[in-house]
Image (spheres, rainbow, N blue to C red):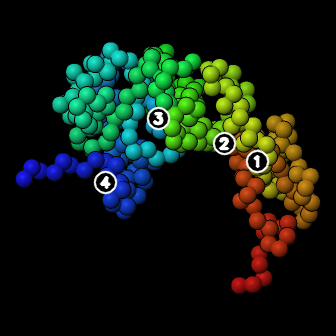
Amino acid sequence: MANAPPQTYEQMLTQNPGWAMAESSLFFQGRGSVQDTLRRITKRLDELSIPYAVAGGLALFAHRYRRFTEDVAFLITVQGLKRVHHELDGRGYVRPFAKSKNLRDTEANVKIEFLIAGQFPGDGKPKAFAFPDPEQVAELYDGMKVLNLPTLVNLKLASGISGHARSRDLSDVEEPIRTLGLREDFVESLDPYVRPKYLDIWRSMHAIPKRYFMIWRNKEIAAAELEKMLADGIVLDPERETKDGYAYLVTTDRRIADKYGMEDESEFYDYEGNDDPEHESAEQ
């Protein structure tokens, strides 16, 4: 009886929840099987002088949107892919099946996917936007070549617009808008094909602006610091009364909120409507 093939990384994640949680924790520390696979193969691509750009979830990670991913993705040219197969297939990497364009790292069994310059995202059918040349859209991050943010958003939108069951790609645009504070005018850096979709997403997310707060005590914030905050557009919240020496500073600009360490409005809680942030329930 032939030996069963080793489990893939995806199968191990599914079948061993405890191990999957440990892997996820390592991933967010820049370690673990996926991150190790990324470092190994980018080193080989650089040694072989094969142009590439890290794409997918790992590119989002590089741009400060932290989410787990179970594979490694690259944008590469047709010529580059031919060299990858010639130089790497059977040398620490193997195709998942005959004629596959992708590889699997035999050490960690992590899948490595390739997006081909000149081909089309989503459903793969011809459209106004194609995968670009990686050399034209890559930037350095931690010694690796990674898709720049406009190109990454372009690809996610184009895939989400035309692909089947690709709602994750559109979610991967919503989260950077939220976490990175992308503005409406970011649309000007995008391809015309995807601009309407970006605006739809951005405007729906900002129909009711998210608010960020800071509790302010006159004695704790220097006048000069308060002046800088007001100059950045932060205002005293008109919906909350100032009492007991407290006031609430508010902004709807995520980047300004991050600058001053302000918190999401949804995280604030007043016991029985008491506006005193240090008020505690009398019940123990």
Report, in whole angstroms, how far the alpha carbon at label 1 lies from the one at label 3: 27 Å
Three-letter code for the amino acid on which mark 4 is drawn: Met
Residue 224 visible? no
**Amino acid found under the numbered disc labelled 3:** Gly
How far separated are the C-alphas under marks 3 and 4? 21 Å
Q: Which residue is mark 4?
A: 12
Of callouts 1 and 3, the N-terminal one? 3
Q: Earlier in the sequence, mark 1 or mark 4?
A: 4
Q: Are marks 3 and 4 in contact (CB under 8 Å)?
A: no
| Image disc number at residue 178 | 2
Image x and y of residue 78, in percent: 35, 17
Residue drawn 44% across the image and 20% down it: 119
Which element carries disc 1, helix, strand or loop?
loop
| Residue type of the residue flagged with mark 1 | Lys
Residues under numbered marks 1 and 2 in contact, where contact means CB atoms less than 8 Å apart: yes
In terms of depth relative to the viewer, which is nearer, 264 or 83? Answer: 83
Q: Position of residue 211 (x, y in %)?
A: 78, 49
Distance CA(mark 1)–CA(mark 2): 9 Å
Q: Is residue 52 left or right of residue 209?
A: left
Q: Secondary structure at mark 2?
A: helix
Above-or-below relation of 136 to 259: above
**In the image as oriented, which residue stretches furthest toward the bottom?**
284
Q: Residue at x 47, y 35 (%)?
A: 56
Number of numbered discs overlaid on the protein picture: 4
According to the image, label 3 marks what residue?
A: 56
Mark earlier in primary sequence (4, 2) = 4
Residue annotated with mark 1: 210
